[in-house]
Image (cartoon, helix red, strand yellow):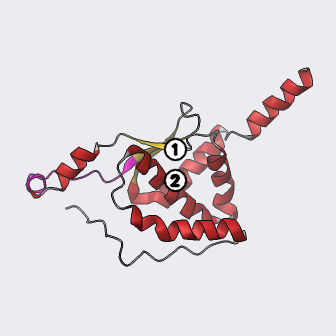
Amino acid sequence: DGDKDVKKDDKKKKGKLSKEESEELMAFLRTALDTRLSDVDVTNRLVDSPAIVSEHDSAVTRRMMQMEEFKALGINKPTGYKLLINPSHPLIVELHKSRNDRPAVAKLVAEQLMDNAMISAGILDHVQSMMPRLTSILTSALSHDDVVAPKPAEDAPKEQASD
């Protein structure tokens, strides 16, 4: 029984990013997600989710900020969101590994990770824009090839830059 406990501990260590690995992944995410991110940090509070978005406005608040009256007052939507990552989640561990081995795939997965966290928080307005990326990720998963980032869908609504 003692050997089983040691094996469990070894397995747990393999399945979690170290502090240094977490810092490396956070640096990668800051670059990959650039303007979509205000900050990224590690949280040990997540169990099943790879990441969540925190410090965001509610859907109602965001819709109000899009109204002309609020724009006239100089109230704009936030420039980025804070992403909290779970260093024990298999997706996060694999993303850390892939950032150097398969950087194009890792960037697509990082973007999808952000979108998934925003969908979970109820703050992603234009889900159609991620469809080409999802297709590329799925193709890569099935072919085990590196992918080329998809071209943005022409019919997907464009984010308007705030002044």
- Do the residues under discs 1 and 2 have CB atoms within 8 angstroms? yes
Q: Position of residue 143 (x, y in %)?
A: 71, 71
Q: Mark 1 is on which residue type?
A: Ala
**Quarter of the rendering occupied by the C terminus:** bottom left
Is residue 94 in the magenta section? no
Q: Position of residue 1 (x, y in %)?
A: 91, 21
Mark nearer the N terminus (1 vs 2): 1
Report the predominant secondary structure element of the magenta stretch: loop
Q: Position of residue 74 (x, y in %)?
A: 13, 53
Neighbour class for label 1 at 10 Å: few (<14), some, many (≥20)?
Answer: many
Residue range corresponding to the magenta coloring:
69-81
At a point 56% along the width and 59% down the height, the residue shown is: 109
Query: Mark on residue 51?
Result: 1
Q: Along the horizontal axis of the image, is 52 left or right of 47?
A: left
Q: Mark 2 is on which residue type?
A: Leu
42 versus 4 height, above or below:
below
Q: Along the horizontal axis of the image, is 30 left or right of 67?
A: right
Q: Position of residue 4 (x, y in %)?
A: 88, 27
4 versus 51 height, above or below:
above
Disc 1 from disc 2: Cα separation: 7 Å
At a point 67% along the width and 59% down the height, the residue shown is: 98
Is residue 72 in the magenta section? yes
- Return the residue at label 2: 113
Q: Secondary structure at mark 1?
A: strand
- The count of marks equals 2
Q: Along the horizontal axis of the image, is 2 left or right of 50?
A: right
Res 152 → quadrant: bottom left
